[in-house]
Amino acid sequence: MGSGTYEIQKSIRLFSNDGSHFDRTPSTEGNRSKWTWSGWIKLTGDGDSYNPIWSAGNNPWTGLHFLDNTLRCVLDAGVGEIGAITDAVFRDAGAWYSIICSVNTGASNASDRIKFWVNGLPASHVAGANGYPSQNYQSIMNTTIAHRLGADGRVAGGGVRHSNMLMADVHFLDGIAISDPDGVFGEFNADTGAWDPIAYAGNYNGPADGLGGVTWSSYVTGSVDSNYPLSKCFGGTIGTGYQNGTRSTNPGSLTLNIAALNLNVTNVRLNTFLSGSPTLTVNGTNVSISGGGDQTHVVAVNGQLNSVVWSYDSSNGPYCYMRGIEVDLGDGSGYRLLTDGSGAPGGSNGYHLDFSDNSTQAALGTDTSGLNNNLTVNSITHTRDTTVWSSYLYGGGQTYDSTDTTQNFQSPSNGRDLAFDGNTGTIAVTHGSGNNYIYFRPPGGFTNTSKIRIFTENVSEFRINGTVVTTNPAATSGAQWYEVTSTLPTTVTEIALKSESSTYNARVRAYEINDVVLTVTGKNTDVLLDSPTSFEPATGNAVGNYATWNKNTERSSIGVQNGGLDATTTLSGSGYVLSTIPLSSGKFYCEITFEGTMSHNTNYMYIGIVPANSASHYNSNDIFRAEGALGIDSQSTYIRGVRGTGL
């Protein structure tokens, strides 16, 4: 993207199959009606079209996400899905998007209560399934419940959905709804017109809105009729009829005296039930009264609101029940109902994640705003793992044997790798007729292990260091994650699984230790140099927009996985896939590793360069026939080149 002086050094890769995400449960409630999320996102195209970005809660939940290629913000989905949906769609699996969402439910215009900007430009939108949020709507965002980055709790029963994307330079502002990101999170490059990120210099937590946490009823003087208590006026709703109002004893009057609060308003709106012409004043000035029953009176103040008085005298006829008092602070958020103990407190949950420190897994969740609102890191690998875990996976016989080192796995020859490819959709299976054991013995063992999960199926027995253990769910419960619930030893040297029966072999899809999914060498290294800022060799910043496989170009039996880093096919499959960044000139470095084998009686696997328009002119079997195409066979024993002739 941009090439300004602000450098985004690293990004994080989120992959739904390994459950990678961040989470935080605030200890203090923040502003539930006003917040801003800003970050850079590159969609990888893995999984389905649902990709959560930032969320709070579990069914109901509030959050920001992609669905069916559109960007959406919903508030308290599951109760009634209110929010906004962009008109634009997002299908580019190779581009970095600057995504900014600003929420201010106090805005008088319904469509202004949720705003989006993409790459610095406003994104038009329509209302959610149940409309835009009502004015001053209080969502569950910034309450003291679980908040997640890269995941949300939309699954019924407490389950969590995860994302497939790269994410960089994440900001969350609590109690602040920006009106324009230009000069705040980015700026337009004067030479190229591109949207460049800049360093955010503002606050992460907004101030109280002037109404937060006030017990308004405590500022009322006069004798209150116990049948019509102050909760009728300051309970948070405006009802109809005298039954939903508060009044004094007969005769008398009540005074809301808030001069000490120094509350400046433009207007006050009184909701009353009247008979005759009782006393009704604002700041000592009589309010014009006309008619009876439920009435609404708007009074201009344009300064400090000091007092509201209303009287009751049934013996002489005129009386007033107060059903609710609203004020307009003149900040564009409209009228706010004075409610005991409510209102918007100051923000407390803002944060900034730049992912620059990957010295440990936990360091990736460090809040660099200075507020110490760190996030917990889940299933994200902070550094390249050079251990070839599959070398320590053994498929043994039908009797438990702690010394069995048979590597008896079904084809392909790299079958053991399938348990460590970071994808719970692929399976490592033993040979045989069933009742076999699968052993995993990590070199040196795992010390200080607090959590073990295995994604598997057809398992009747789990063992740790030879001892049978219990799991949640219990064995033979189908293909899913199984977490060991027994007490774990200090050092885990072996994890053993036994097939369910003589018919069904145990199948291993993934191992997870202390919330980190184990993968073959170098895969699922989730801290990447791929970032929204361009590479600048003069500064040696070693960052930039890196190419991956483009999910949108996969054809026939080719499948893109693992965040765009892997392209797989069957033993005799055919097809092609293109990179995300087309190149027209210059010199570029490319590093590709081939694994497995192809049947050379039928197919060859090539890597090379093809003209950009080749995909539209050649089918999946002959793209290297395009004129100007250059390629080389992947197999070292079959070194051969190909040059397209256009025939």
Image (tube, grey):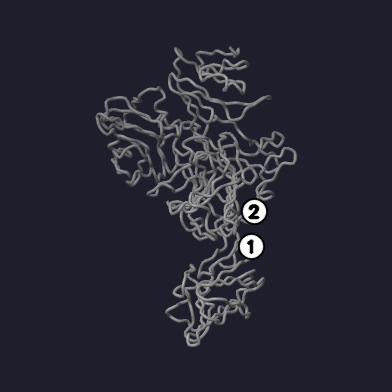
Q: Nearer the viewer, residue 517 or 321?
A: 321
Quadrant of image for the N terminus = top right
Residue 578 pos. (x, y %): 56, 26
For image coordinates 47% across by 15% down, the residue present is: 603
Question: Is 343 located above or below residue 451 in the figure?
Answer: below
Find the distance from the CA under tag 2 to the CA under tag 1.
Answer: 12 Å
Q: Is residue 299 left or right of residue 557?
A: right
The image quarter containing residue 161 is: top left
Question: Is 33 located above or below residue 229 in the figure?
Answer: above
Q: Few, some or many C-alpha atoms within 10 Å of disc 1 (few <14, some 14-19, many ≥20)? A: few
Q: Is residue 3 left or right of residue 241?
A: right
Residue 47 pos. (x, y %): 47, 36
Q: Nearer the viewer, residue 201 or 405?
A: 201
Residue 187 pos. (x, y %): 69, 45
Report if the CB atoms under discs 2 and 1 are less than 8 Å apart.
Answer: no
Residue 510 pos. (x, y %): 40, 35
Q: Few, some or many C-alpha atoms within 10 Å of disc 2 (few <14, some 14-19, many ≥20)? A: few
Which amino acid, mark 2? Ser
Quadrant of image for the C terminus = top right
Question: Is 219 located above or below residue 564 in the figure?
Answer: below
Which amino acid, mark 1? Asp
For image coordinates 39% across by 26% down, the residue present is: 415
Residue topped by disc 2: 179
Task: Mark 2 or mark 1: name the one nearer the start of the chain.
Answer: 2
Q: Nearer the viewer, residue 164 or 436?
A: 164
Residue topped by disc 1: 331
Q: Nearer the viewer, residue 335 or 530?
A: 335
Q: Is residue 181 left or right of residue 496?
A: right
- Evaluate whether residue 216 shows in this view: yes
